[in-house]
Image (cartoon, rainbow, N blue to C red):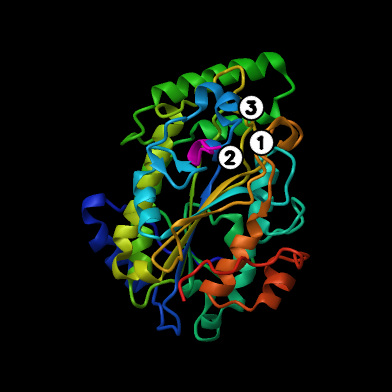
Amino acid sequence: MSVHMTSRRAFMSGALAAGATAMLPRCVFADVATDARFVLVLLRGALDGLAAVPAYGDGAYAAKRAALAITAPQLKLDGMFALHPSLASLHAQFQAKELIVFHAVASPYRERSHFDGQDLLENGTSIPKAAHDGWLNRALPLLPEAKERATDRIALALAQNVPLVLRGDARVGSWAPSRLPETDSDTLQRIADLYSTDEYFASRLQTALAADGVAGEGMSTGRRDPLNALNTVAAAAGKFLAAADGPRIAVLEASGWDTHANQGAERGQLANRLRGLDQALSSLRTSLGTAWSRSAVLVVTEFGRTVAVNGTAGTDHGTATCAFLAGGAVAGGRVVADWPGLANSALYEGRDLRPTLDVRSIMKGVLASHLGAAESGLEERAFPGSRATRPLEGLFKA
């Protein structure tokens, strides 16, 4: 793996524009043939899709979700689905026909390990650990603009460590602010997963995580808040991509979506995190400026969560979830879902939302229709062994 690292420096929100502009000369980007921008946002920890996009119109929804149900949604999408009340900016984008909401989405992964789920989401195969590089890295040489400039002038990871999805033979750029949040509950939750068979240890660690979640409900300016960091890098990403000679692809990530305890419904731990995500995506749109009209932002997570509430007022690791595709280039204002329903007979293994859409179809659609990658290259190289998984069409404006 060859990774081009740019220097890290602090981006204060008040001086964000000047800071990004000052950084760009250190990453000398050449003019390219396409003006399309793409931002991939990875939510680590398994976002509860039935919380972010409640299926309030499903007859089994209220009973199955119990205390977590949002039965009188304010931000309706249609007669079946709504957005969580914390996602007001995303709802405005939906109304402006700049957002597609996908539901009952999953990768080919059917187990419930964060480690393996994230690995497969990023490596682009159907088997965890089947590849040590990422689908987006493998796709970079397939893009038309790769004929005109080096890939490290095309793609940028905004993180301390380049995510797997961008690791590989193709060189990429990297930037991160000098101050990032301390270890958060998502990292602790991964540790808990390792000891899940130890009832004594697992129960006490879950109690500690729940207390930490309550203590951090402010989710605003604390250094422990990963979404505060996401807002910073999202605004920076927009400045980078908005530059005429800047990169065209950026990858962002945010942890903390593992809501095993005290999840909350309209208010609470998850509501605060969703509000932070909404603000970060709004900051990204603002900083992109006029480039927004040529942009697509894909938000994905490794898997969903159980339909039913667990014994600690949260949800456990599940299967299908939701995904979002936003941007001025997106033919939005609709929900894409082959909805399986929430009746007992419809659930996956009797507990999870059943997946009906492979997330790779969305990824392929973005790469082919928005970024111009050849479909044959996507099947053979970016997503090997995925010929049966067709790219979604009609995701973008003509």
Q: Residue 46: give its label.
A: 2
Look at the numbered disc 3 and give the secondary structure of its residue.
helix
Please identify the quarter of the rendering in which residue 59 is found.
top right
Q: Name the residue under label 1.
A: 318
Q: Picture coordinates of residue 340 (x, y %)? A: 67, 43
Q: Residue 192: give its label.
A: 3
Quadrant for the N terminus in the image? bottom right
Which amino acid type is shown beneath numbered disc 3?
A: Ala
Pair 1/2: label in front: 1
Question: Is 215 left or right of 68, judged from the image as shown?
Answer: left
Q: Which of disc 2 and disc 3 is earlier in sequence?
A: 2
Q: 72 or 88: which is nearer to us?
A: 72
Report if residue 177 is visible in the image.
no
Q: Residue at x 45, y 85 (%)?
A: 33
From the image, give the main secondary structure of the stretch colored magenta. Answer: loop
Which amino acid type is shown beneath numbered disc 2?
A: Ala
Residue range corresponding to the magenta coloring? 51-57
Look at the numbered disc 1 and give the secondary structure of its residue.
loop
